[in-house]
Image (cartoon, grey):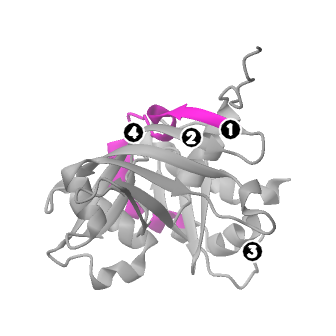
Amino acid sequence: MKDQASVLRETDEEARKLARVLLRSARYAALAVLDPATGFPFASRVLLGTDIDGVPVILVSALSTHTKALEADPRASLLTGEPGRGDPLAHPRLTTQSIAEPVERGSAVHQRIRTRFLDRHAKAKLYIDFPDFRFFRLVPQSASLNGGFGRAYVLEGADLMILSPANEAVAAQAAQTVRDLVEEHADLSEALAELFKAPNDAAWRICGVDCAGFDAISGDLLNRCEFESPIENATDIKSHISKIAYSLREI
């Protein structure tokens, strides 16, 4: 009897990029944990952000089942990827298996994540500083990408992370970088709308920068733009963002 052919494709850079975009462009995700009371898988919806190294982060209440589960067992899975028109199974999605790391309140990492999270989820300001709320970094260990029918890939955790020596430097100057871009490009919002093929009256703003790309938001819409490769010098961040934002006007 012949062995059944593998449904997996060889993981290439195109698959890695799709996986990174599915994870980094998600405003929310389905989170699966192990319920310590029953041992059964427990799934819920959480708001999603990313740290400067590409690690996804969640903000959760100590009163919730998933927080208690993560405290008992740090293993978790995230499902990201939006279904579009037609068959929802024909659209790409990513399952990321992670180890949850609690973020110490008051630490430099906490402040960095808090700032990045609020840039993406402004309404979270209503409760982000409540004493029972905390951040977890969900460090990717492996991932399963389904790019649509017949397009399945397995990725390593490192494929989803930003491994650049400039991470800390970019994080330190992120807010100033965005201010400089707005000052230097008065039509930045219009350029982003054109890039995303959005209505011209949509007000787009950059809500996150890192060594691998940038995030832009307009209302409930979030788009991720990846650089061709992560930058290794923080001084290159503005030129890379400008190049992508104005790429259509150069054609």
Examine the rendered structure and indicate whether residue 102 appears above or below residue 85.
above
Whether pointer 2 and pointer 1 mark residues with C-beta atoms closer than 8 Å, the reply is yes
The tag on residue 166 is 4
Name the residue beneath numbered marker 2. 144
Q: Mark 3 points at which residue?
A: 198
**Three-letter residue code for mark 2:** Ser
109 left or right, relative to 242: left
Sooner in the amino-acid sequence: mark 3 or mark 2: 2
On the picture, is 142 further left or further right than 12? Answer: left
- The residue at the point 27 percent across, 58 percent down is 38
Residue extending farthest to the right is 251
Magenta-colored stretch includes residue 170? yes
- Gap between marks 2 and 4 measured at Cα: 28 Å
Upstream in the sequence, badge 2 or badge 1? 2
Identified by mark 1, the residue type is Ala
Observer-side mark, 3 or 4, equals 3
Front tag of 4 and 1: 1
The first of marks 3 and 4 along the sequence is 4
Query: Label 1: which residue?
Result: 152
Neighbor class of circle 1 (other Cα within 10 Å; few <14, some 14-19, many 20+) is: many
Q: How far apart are marks 3 and 4 (CA)?
A: 32 Å
Q: Position of residue 149 (x, y in %)?
A: 78, 46
* Residue span colored magenta: 152-181
Residue sitting nearer the eye, 136 or 112: 136
Q: What element carries label 2?
A: strand
Which residue is painted at 21% across and 73% down in the image?
Answer: 63
